[in-house]
Amino acid sequence: MQQAIGILGTGRMGVRLARMFAAAGRDVILGSRDAARAERIVRALNMANLRPGSYDAALAAPVVLPAIFIRDGLFEQLEMYRERLAGKLYIDITNPFNSDYTDFILPWSTSGAEEIAALLPRTRIVGAFKNVWWEVFDEPLFGGEPSDVYVVSDDPAARREFLCLAEGTPFRYIDAGPLKNARTVERMTLLSGELGQRCGFFPRMNWRLLGSLRRPGAKDALADLIAR
Ligand SMILES: NC(=O)c1ccc[n+]([C@@H]2O[C@H](COP(=O)([O-])OP(=O)(O)OC[C@H]3O[C@@H](n4cnc5c(N)ncnc54)[C@H](OP(=O)(O)O)[C@@H]3O)[C@@H](O)[C@H]2O)c1
């Protein structure tokens, strides 16, 4: 069954994720605080299954992907939406960056994903795309190879649902375990951002943590590990 995805926020990630999911055949509502802005962006993208709207319209979808920074008040907005998000699949892409991207605004003992799960106890949370810098969506293949996306969740059904939605998108999805692994996944973005800028690789990087050489006999384990 086709599940519409409601995206909140028309910034760098929101627009690209909307375009990516629509290109893969999903129905997408791109929501903005300024509905006219969403309208303009959607008109320019000109995709049959992508429509513009308000946050209210995007929140009506059964799958919701807020593309808003924690530092810009995401948690406060989610508190207002708690009832509307109950039972829905929530795709969490947050990295808790401060405003100059030098550190995180959450302590080591938690993650954006876990804080969202605590705020929305009746919502099914899946974390993904945290290591994909926005520029990569414009050119997702590295030497013809798709880049890895680490998928974290405490809800196996939600993870499966997410992977169905991601079918046909230009990434390789890796089951990265429980939601608390988001602490590591999010901080990988912080470290890679720092290293990438220092060494001149930023932002087209993070394509494959596991490398490309599989040990002999690892095929069966790989089938469990890679979620697609
Ligand atoms: N940038 C990356 O490369 C990257 C990579 C992985 C994950 N992420 C995560 O993706 C999320 C979005 O990142 P982004 O780079 O797309 O951010 P962005 O370009 O700054 O866009 C964020 C959007 O949030 C919406 N918004 C809602 N309330 C806001 C407020 N009070 N102030 C400012 N904007 C507000 C705005 O959309 P409307 O005006 O349309 O409502 C805005 O365009 C963040 O959680 C970030 O950690 C980013």
Image (spheres, helix red, strand yellow):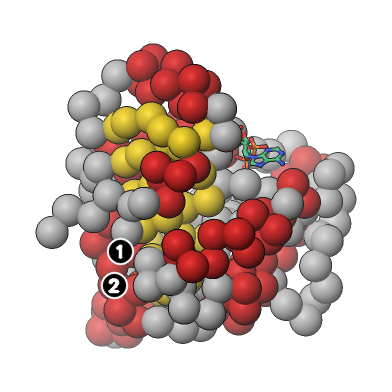
Residue at numbered disc 2: 160
Q: Secondary structure at mark 2?
A: helix
Looking at the rendering, the quadrant in which ligand 1 lies is: top right
Residue 144, image quadrant:
top left
Label pair 1/2, CB-CB below 8 angstroms: yes
The quadrant of the rendering that contains the N terminus is bottom left
Residue 118 seen from this side: yes
- Locate residue 146, reporting x and y percent: 38, 48
Q: Secondary structure at mark 1?
A: helix
Q: Is residue 93 above or below residue 170?
A: below
User: What residue would you read off at disc 1?
Assistant: 163
The residue closer to the viewer here, 61 or 95, is: 61
| Residue 214 located left or right of residue 77 | left
Looking at the rendering, in which quadrant would you find the C terminus?
A: bottom left
**Residue 188, image x and y in percent?**
68, 63
Q: Which mark is residue 212?
A: none
Residue at 32 percent of width and 31 percent of height: 51
Q: Position of residue 111 (x, y in %)?
A: 69, 71
Residue appearing at x 32%, y 59% in the figure: 62
